Image: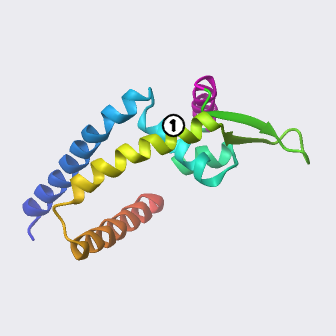
Amino acid sequence: MNPSELYDLHIEIKELSRLSQELIEPSLVKYDLTSVQYRALQLIVLNESLAVKYISNHLNIKPAAGTALIDRLERKNLIERCHSEDDRRVVYIQATEIGKETYHSINRCFTKIFNDFYGVLNEEETVRLKQIVGKLTDHVSSCIEEQ
């Protein structure tokens, strides 16, 4: 492919990402969550107990932004802070029952959306797309880290 065709491909991928975000946004708005808040909630629910530092690192946000994110989720009663029994300075974040229910409810909405979204692909195409996107993500991430 020539540079112009590659750029067009890049624009198409970017548009696909925008459109997919547009599909899921109403589900998040219904629960008064941003996509970053949902991602943090997902991490917490799936891992049961995490340190704020881990969440910030995983989401590539500054520690202060991670703390503010956790504060917002806590005000919504989706998560709670728990002090370590070994070291009271260490605080772990856990999902509340409301947080778990909210996460699973959003996931059910997402399942329907993504089944429709990716339904135009057969299983082989879906597997191949996942491999290609993963390969590109790994490559671009390593290029950025090297800068």
Horizontal and vertical percent for residue 93?
A: 70, 41
Q: Residue furthest right?
A: 86
Q: Toward the viewer: 114 or 73? A: 114
Horizontal and vertical percent for residue 50?
A: 69, 48
Residue 100 lies in the magenta stretch = no
For the question of whether residue 61 can be seen, the reply is no
Residue beneath the point at 46% across and 62% down = 146
Residue beneath the point at 24% across and 43% down = 18
For mark 1, give the secondary structure: helix
Query: Is 136 displayed left or right of 100 in the figure?
Result: left
Reply above or below: 14 against 135.
above
Q: Which corner quadrant of the image does residue 34 belong to?
A: top left
Horizontal and vertical percent for residue 100?
A: 58, 42
Q: What stretch is highlighted in magenta?
A: 63-76
Q: Toward the viewer: 76 or 140? A: 76
For the question of whether residue 144 can be seen, the reply is yes
Q: Quadrant of the C terminus?
A: bottom left
Query: Is 97 displayed left or right of 127 in the figure?
Result: right
Residue beneath the point at 58% across and 53% down = 46
Residue 69 lies in the magenta stretch = yes
Q: Which corner quadrant of the image does residue 105 belong to?
A: top left
Query: Is 141 displayed left or right of 122 in the figure?
Result: right
Q: Which corner quadrant of the image does residue 13 belong to?
A: bottom left
> Circle 1 is placed at which residue position?
102
Horizontal and vertical percent for residue 129?
A: 26, 69
Reply above or below: 8 against 44.
below
Mark 1 is surrounded, within 10 Å at the Cα level, by few (under 14), some (14 to 19) or many (20 or more) other residues, namely: some
Q: Residue furthest top?
A: 75
Q: Quadrant of the N terminus?
A: bottom left
The dominant secondary structure in magenta is helix
Which kind of residue does numbered mark 1 sit on? Answer: Thr
